[in-house]
Image: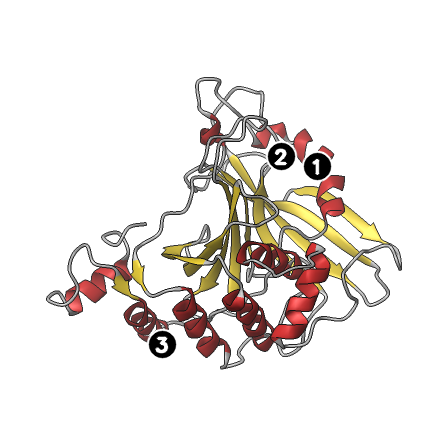
Amino acid sequence: MNNEQDPVARAIRTLDPARTGADDPIPLSAELRLREIVSMQEEPVHTRWRAPNIVSGVIAASVTVMLALVASWVWWPSFSAQAYTPAPLSYAATSGDVQDVIHAAKEMLASGKGVLEPQRLSLSEGWYFSGTPDTEGPVLITRERIDLRWEADLSGSVRTTVAAVTTPDGVLVPEATPAAGSLIGELTFAPAEFSVVSVNAPAATSDAMRAWIRADRGATGQLGAGDVILGVQSLLGQWTLTDRQQAALLDVLAQAPGARFLGTTHDRMGRPVMAISAVPESNAHQDVTLLLALDTGRIVGFESTLRTEDESLGLPAGSVTAYTLWEIEN
């Protein structure tokens, strides 16, 4: 969404047309303040969330079931590869840098309106590229809801259902099959079967968060911003964290080299967000992005896109390969 389409951006320009040119970046402080004023007139919504990269084994175990749902993946041979992946998000130019964004997010997180204690629970919706479809018909994208819950004895369960079916541009297709709510897969874990970095959540300090990410990524040297983002994705795929813990995560990102501020946008559920992106050292062909809510500062999304063409997948540069949305209604 560009500045002319965004109602908040239009409002800022209307309030101060002389100082904010039609093509100038919107000041981050102005956008945050106006959204805060607008939110005062709305009923607050408290939601829960979860991550995609829960456990590679969990996702892999349900791939067979997901691929069986070819009705949710259909393809016209005349379409390019990018046509059957979700359209990339577009970002509005916003003044400020990564440090400004993280500072603003931490100020909002300081209010402590999130969960009071970390929970062994991850609830998310997302889409994950699983291969080229080979059937004919209209192009549809199935967004999945993944509900992961586990216990201190390493027992647990993961349930995957259809969250929504959309076109690549995100337009809902309510009549599509399988319908929203349809079960894709369900797994249960007996005690000691579920694998995690630690049975206890990391403390709300940057040192503890950095140590967790190092263990998760198998890192020995300095963490780059891209690998921090992948570590955050993995952590939120296992835990629901408090605001203080999320602030500590953002501190780790702020201290890592390679992060860049993309601007503001709306995520795939229409929520206003700020985007921080980086290239992982483990995969120079990939861009990974964290989305921070403009109204709470919490981490609410993750996106992965290709920086270069991937011939093995048949995808051009810029293709979205996965996205995850947290902070969703339970």
Return the residue at label 3.
40
The residue drawn where x is 57% and y is 48% is 126
- Expressed as whole percent of the image width and height from the top left, the position of residue 63 reads 70, 36
- Expressed as whole percent of the image width and height from the top left, the position of residue 128 reads 59, 41
**In the figure, 113 relative to 213: above or below?**
below
- Expressed as whole percent of the image width and height from the top left, the position of residue 206 reads 61, 74
Tell me, what colour scheme is on the image? secondary structure
**SS class, disc 3:** loop
Q: Which mark is residue 63?
A: 1
Callout 3 amino acid? Met
The residue drawn where x is 30% and y is 68% is 31
Left/right of residue 239 with respect to residue 93 in the rendered view = right
**SS class, disc 1:** helix
| Quadrant the C terminus occupies | bottom right
Return the residue at label 2.
130
- Spatial distance from mark 2 to mark 3, Cα to Cα? 41 Å
The residue drawn where x is 64% and y is 42% is 182
Outermost front residue: 221
**In the figure, 3 relative to 252: above or below?**
above
Q: Are marks 1 and 2 in contact (CB under 8 Å)?
A: yes
Left/right of residue 75 with respect to residue 16 in the rendered view = right
- Of 96 and 189, nearer the camera is 96
